[in-house]
Amino acid sequence: MAISTILASIPGIIEILVILVGIAILLAVANYGKNTSLGYFGSLLLAIFTTPLIAFFIILIFFKKDR
């Protein structure tokens, strides 16, 4: 059987996978921003209230890594 047939046979599996990928991206952005002045939770909140891609670029441009 093809993967698309298997995925289509389980109701709601695509939605669950999209949500899990979204959460993983949020956590990756928060992990990237943990050593900045925003910190982990600040970066996570920024990624939640904007989008992870926009939050990543904001952190990359405006918040430098603490050493």
Image (cartoon, rainbow, N blue to C red):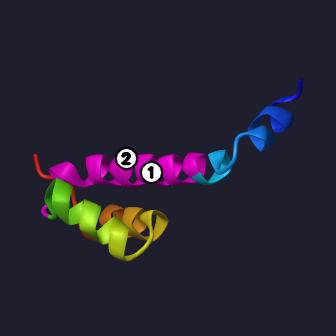
Residue 14, image x and y in percent? 67, 49
Secondary structure at badge 2 equals helix
Query: In the depicted view, which residue is nearer to us: 33 or 18?
Result: 18
Residue 21, image x and y in percent? 52, 47
Query: In the depicted view, which residue is nearer to us: 12 or 59?
Result: 12
Task: Say which residue appears at 88% left-offset and 28% top-offset.
Answer: 2
Question: Residue most toward the right?
Answer: 1
Secondary structure at badge 1 equals helix
Determine whether 44 is above or below 34 in the image: below
Majority SS type along the magenta span: helix
For badge 2, the amino acid type reads Ala
Is residue 4 within the magenta segment? no
Residue 28: which numbered mark, if any?
2
Classed neighbour count for the residue bearing mark 1: other residues with Cα under 10 Å, few (<14), some (14–19), many (≥20): some
Q: Pointers 2 and 1 in contact (CB under 8 A)?
A: yes
Q: Quadrant of residue 7?
A: top right
Q: Which residues are magenta?
A: 16-37
